[in-house]
């Protein structure tokens, strides 16, 4: 085994474990910097973090967050945007200072300038202490699809048709799924001090096997994590 794998029973256990890891960073760092993901996988982790905030166990007062990605062309108020997702599942429920929330702006007039500004913002306060990741069925992390350079920085990415198909479950129809997104690059992601990859559900067994045991190749973006000194997987899949 090349990458550390923490095997848990189910989604509940996965989300508890992930929330615990986030809480440790929040308690340890005076100004925690988190890298966050959206999608189905981390939903319950956010729910648990909100619960623990409500119990007074944690605060986000001094936390700075960077989200991995955002669709091009969707407004923050669009219920399919990742900004909307983050507000709904975390930010509106906790004491985070909105000025400390960074999500690429998919409506920016100049997208490459927006990507540069995002990189500069990370540089200013980084490194990211803890990066939470999910993974696509094709091995993508963020919206870095197979073939993306391991050295990539935040950029405009083209979504694979298979990704649009998978993500269409969140939209009214496939036609509504944007064809492009802004995403943190793989090089950017790899600069985080600690990286936790959450992999939930048997349908991801095949890709997880490749990520953990397979070759490190740009054809399987998440396989790059094998080369990170402090990246590991939490999964409910038997591997
Ligand atoms: C989301 C993101 C994506 C997802 C991946 C898995 O911000 O960066 O890489 O983590 O597509 O999505 P789910 O969890 O919906 O299976």
Image (spheres, rainbow, N blue to C red):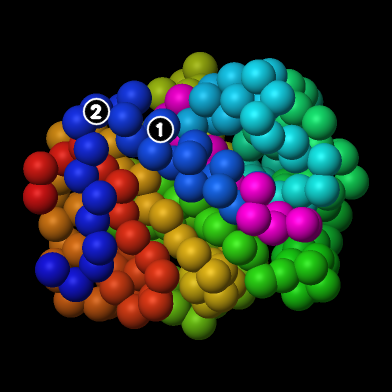
Marker count (numbered): 2
| Residue at numbered disc 1 | 15
* Depicted 170 relative to depicted 178: above or below: above
Residue 5 in sight from this viewpoint: yes
46 part of magenta stretch: no
User: Residue, x 49% and y 64% (percent of image)?
Assistant: 194
Residue at the extreme left: 239
Q: How far across and down, in percent of the image, does residue 212 sit? A: 20, 63
Q: Which residue is mark 2?
A: 10
Can you give x and y, in whole percent of width and height, for residue 198 in the image? 36, 45
Q: Give the vertical position of 210 relative to 103 (above or below).
A: below
Residue nearer the viewer, 37 or 152: 37
Q: Marks 1 and 2, Cα distance to the nearest angstrom?
A: 9 Å
* Residue drawn at 19 percent across, 72 percent down: 2
Q: Residue at x 16, y 40 (%)?
A: 237
Mark 1 surroundings within 10 Å by alpha-carbon count, few (fewer than 14), some (14 through 19), many (20 or more): many
- The foreground one among 233 and 84 is 233
Where residue 110 sits, quadrant-wise, is: bottom right
Measured along the vertical axis of the image, is residue 190 above or below residue 118? below
């Amino acid at each position: 085994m090349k990458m550390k794998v923490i095997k848990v029973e189910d989604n509940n256990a996965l989300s508890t474990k992930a929330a615990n890891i986030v809480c440790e960073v929040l308690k340890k760092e005076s100004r925690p910097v988190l890298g966050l993901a959206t999608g189905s996988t981390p939903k319950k982790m956010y729910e648990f973090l909100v619960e623990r905030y409500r119990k007074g166990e944690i605060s986000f007062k001094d936390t700075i967050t960077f989200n991995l990605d955002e669709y091009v062309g969707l407004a923050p108020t669009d219920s399919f945007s990742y900004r909307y997702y983050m507000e709904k599942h975390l930010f509106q429920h906790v004491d985070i200072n909105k000025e400390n929330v960074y999500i690429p702006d998919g409506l920016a007039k100049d997208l490459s300038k927006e990507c540069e500004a995002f990189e500069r913002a990370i540089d200013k306060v980084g490194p990211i202490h803890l990066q939470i990741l999910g993974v696509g069925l094709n091995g993508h992390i963020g919206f870095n699809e197979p073939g993306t350079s391991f050295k990539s920085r935040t950029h405009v990415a083209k979504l694979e048709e298979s990704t649009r198909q998978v993500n269409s479950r969140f939209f009214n129809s496939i036609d509504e799924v944007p064809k492009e997104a802004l995403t943190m690059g793989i090089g950017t992601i790899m600069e985080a001090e600690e990286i936790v990859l959450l992999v939930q559900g048997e349908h991801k067994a095949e890709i997880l096997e490749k990520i953990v045991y397979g070759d490190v190749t740009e054809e399987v973006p998440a396989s790059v994590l094998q080369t990170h000194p402090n990246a590991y997987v939490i999964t409910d899949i038997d591997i």
